[in-house]
Image (cartoon, grey):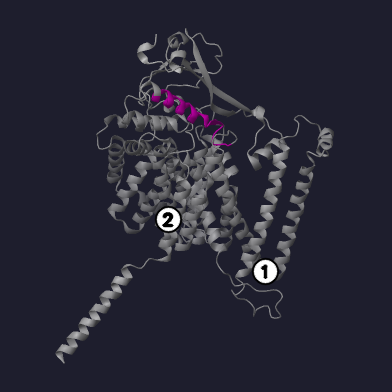
Amino acid sequence: MVSESFEANATQQQAEKTEVTKASFTISGEAIAYFVLIALSLVLLLAELDVVPMSDSEVPAALAAWHLVFPDAPGDFVQSNSPILFWGQTLTFSIMGGTEFASRLPTVIGSLLLIFLPYLFRDRVGRSQAFVWSVVIALSPIAFVAVRLSNPVIWSVLFAGLFLNFLWRYDTTKALPDILWASASLAGLLFLSEPGGLILGVIIFLGGVVAIWLTVINAPLELDIPGDEVIAFARDWLTKLPWQYIVGMLVLISLIVSTAFMSYPSGMAMVGELIADAVMGIFQPLDFTTPSFAALTTLLAYDPIVIGFAVVGIIVLFRRGDVGFIHRFALGWVGIGLLFMLLYRRANPGHALWLLLPTTFFASYLINDLLMNRQVMMYWSENFDTDSDTKYWWVKWVLGVALLFILLMIAVHLQEMGRIAIRLPQDLNSEQLIQTLQEPAYVTILSSGLWVILTSIIGVIGYFLAASIWGNTNSLQGVGIGFMVFMVVANLTSGWNTAVVGADYPGELWHYRATDSEIYLLRETLFEVSQRDTQGFPLIPITVYDSPDTSLMDSDGLVAWLLRDFPNTQFVSTLPEVQRDQIVILPAEILDPDLGASYVGQSFTIYNTWTTGSQNFAEMLAWFTQRQLRPESVLVDRVLLWLRADVYDGLPVNERP
């Protein structure tokens, strides 16, 4: 009996161990969903990452890191204003070499962390909304382009989200590690990411002030307490914060990261540069290639559907009375952020991401609600109160697919109108325009416009018919789902075309001065010459004329990055200094330079610049639908590569004059 009991207990213990082992290897559906999302995002972010040429906005940070890794690199040293990007690029350059891929890889990693960020808030907003939130962030064309262009604003937004998460946790737990992590994230936001991070910190602070103010106003109705008690609670909460630890952590993290544990003491200069650039942005614009209100214009032009979802989500929240402190804070964040987009003069297109987290938060609330199956009362039922059920969940998906086809048809015809409108002659009066549109080459504009109107009318009539049969709830959900799927298609297309397909075309708000892909041909030509002249080592002497009259070939700009592997490159400021040098690079405007010897030259396009000005309706339609510009609106900047005749002929070095 004892042996049987012992064997039974052993069998039971073994079964329990087996169950525990099986449970430990169970992977939840949520984990699989996040893994698939991160994997797909990684594929899109890394695809052809090294094919797109460097933009003007990327070069300074890359050159700063490259000069630390390769001190003999040509050009002037540029002080980085993003410590986190500086050390990330220094690490990847040390491992992979100075390539475009290595330059952009740190920001890709930051973007993946940003996509995963809503997972930290899942206990607050719900697991389903947190995942939808991550999907909306991953689909943002603004975030996608910012990553592909290695814009450090990604790090600002990431640190802002981490700061709010740990501060929220501290409010619940009052644990010291949480406030220390919040302080470290705040240091990253204010002093380690980029100049706009300091501005984003101010936006978040003022958003919190707005949230407290709104809570004070609504306290008598919602909380049944006077507003003074809310103010007293907020004041008491702030005074009880361990400020000595917060300040100490801010200083310590800023010092450690910027100097890499004091191995690079001059790294603190990057923090000073960051603060100086942030302050100067209040008074001076960044450069002539960044237009006014670039961040706000980019937000409205590239992500209008998400903005629409966010606005509707806010309306739904207020109608349901579900507005809490976090919603007021996000709303204050949006309002203050829009104000700073108008006032801050150094806001570049990437700073449209200042509003990424709050807008996608509201949008995810609405999208998550659209995906829920609601009980709906069918009007055609004999008994109005007996046919309410979720068994008609499929109706919203059918309506969503129908609306998707309508939206795609409208988009196709609008693109056709824009494609032809750009060919219309300029400065036509009304009578001339009507006559021109009747010509066979332009009559498609009228037919496409008619199709847009008819399709829109059909969509509106179809909605009311569906609502009369299936009810407003299902019909509105179907409309939302149709726009949601259209958003997925439009955002992926917009982001890819901007960051990859049209990277060298100046018709995007991200690059009014776009780097032409011919720069790769220039670099390959120089490597071919060095292969023949210096046995493959890039040691051939190159002279670059850094003209004071143009920024085309600055010693800290794009040309310096192209020649980063040629240590015997020198930048000179007067033409006599380039005479009789073996390889000379000059602006193409100097057509017949006196180089003191016989040379062979070849032209290379460096920049394509959008000479912005007043646009008529046809040009605006072409830009909005096709990103097309009139040829006369694009200014082409070229350089001439001059090879001395003996170098061009391949004479041995000892036989050259």
Q: Position of residue 38 (x, y in %)?
A: 43, 54
Range shown magenta:
508-531
Is-magenta flag for residue 511? yes
Q: Is residue 272 visible?
A: no
Other-residue count near label 2 (Cα within 10 Å), few / some / many at <14 / 14–19 / ≥20:
few
215 or 297: nearer the viewer: 297
Is-magenta flag for residue 522? yes
Q: Amino acid at mark 2?
A: Glu
Q: Amino acid at mark 1?
A: Gly
Up-down relation of residue 185 to residue 459 (above or below): above
Q: Which residue is mark 2?
A: 229
Image quarter of residue 256: top left
Inter-mark Cα distance, 1 to 2: 45 Å
**Mark 1 against mark 2, which lies toward the viewer?**
1
Q: Name the residue located 40 percent from the left edge and 29 percent from the top edge.
A: 276
- Image quarter where the N terminus lies is bottom left
Q: Is residue 556 left or right of residue 449?
A: left
Q: Position of residue 635 (x, y in %)?
A: 60, 26
Q: Which residue is mark 1?
A: 471
Q: Is residue 182 left or right of residue 481?
A: left
Q: Name the residue located 45 percent from the left edge and 25 percent from the top edge.
A: 557
Other-residue count near label 1 (Cα within 10 Å), few / some / many at <14 / 14–19 / ≥20:
some
Question: Which residue, as the protein is rendered here, is positioned at the far left?
Answer: 2
Q: Name the residue located 15 percent from the left edge and 90 percent from the top edge.
A: 2
